[in-house]
Image (cartoon, grey):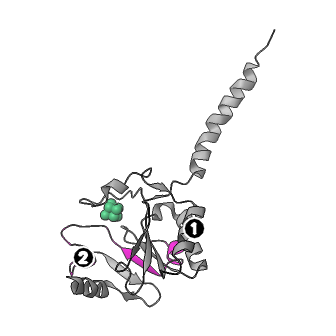
Amino acid sequence: MQFIDVTQSFYRQRDLILVLPILKLCIVMFNYVTPPEMVFQEVPKEIALCFTITGCPLNCPGCHSKDTHDPTAGSPLTLGVYKQWLIDYKQFISCVLFFGGEWEQKYLIKLLKLAHKLELKTCLYTGKNNLPNTVLEHLDYVKYGPWIANLGGLESEQTNQQLWNLHTGELLNPLIRATRQLDD
Ligand code: SF4
């Protein structure tokens, strides 16, 4: 006759209940829209490989990237996948640009460090108005500010958004405006 040790089974279940939330905290959801794009105008004087990270929690009214708000959209940007993109593009680019991702700060910092290690500059476009120094110290450029439709984007004179060169302290909005006017 087989005896079931109910005490042990109870403890196993209880342990699982305790461990699951911890496991969940350890899993980083950091998906990106594939493939990343090479961009020429988002960071003045740089050719950037741009990663759009899904899961932006800001929900700016009129956001034109609503399809990227779901954090499960896109594909996981694992360290291995990211490194391979940088290696493949390194000879064509000077900078790595992230559209979002600051909500997974520790993981983003890892990716920024890796870009610097490969001698690429780094830029983050965030909808926030500020970032902690722990992130800023790994960036060469930052764009601050949520999307406010009636003020427009970086090319607008009225915009609330600001693109900074963090080394020189230069506000780069005028350069963005000049480049986009040339294109019109
Ligand atoms: S920060 Fe950008 S992606 Fe996020 S909600 Fe605002 S406009 Fe959309």
Image x and y of residue 93, in percent: 47, 80
Q: Which residue is mark 1?
A: 84
Crowd around label 2: few <14 · some 14–19 · many ≥20 (10 Å) = some
Image x and y of residue 148, in percent: 24, 67
Nearer the observer, disc 1 or disc 2?
A: 1
**Ligand 1 within 8 Å, label 2 CB:** no
Q: In what quadrant of the picture does the C terminus appear?
A: bottom left
Q: Secondary structure at mark 2?
A: loop
Q: Kindly identify the residue that appears in the image at 33 percent across and 54 percent down.
A: 67
| Residue in front for this viewpoint, 114 or 104 | 114
Residue 112: in sight, yes or no?
A: no
Crowd around label 1: few <14 · some 14–19 · many ≥20 (10 Å) = few
Q: Is residue 25 above or below residue 142?
A: above
Residue 159's tag is 2
The stretch in magenta equals 131-160
Most prominent secondary structure in the magenta stretch?
A: loop
Q: Kindly identify the residue that appears in the image at 45 percent across and 71 percent down.
A: 131
**Distance (Cα) linking label 1 and label 2:** 36 Å
Q: Kindly identify the residue that appears in the image at 22 percent across and 79 percent down.
A: 156
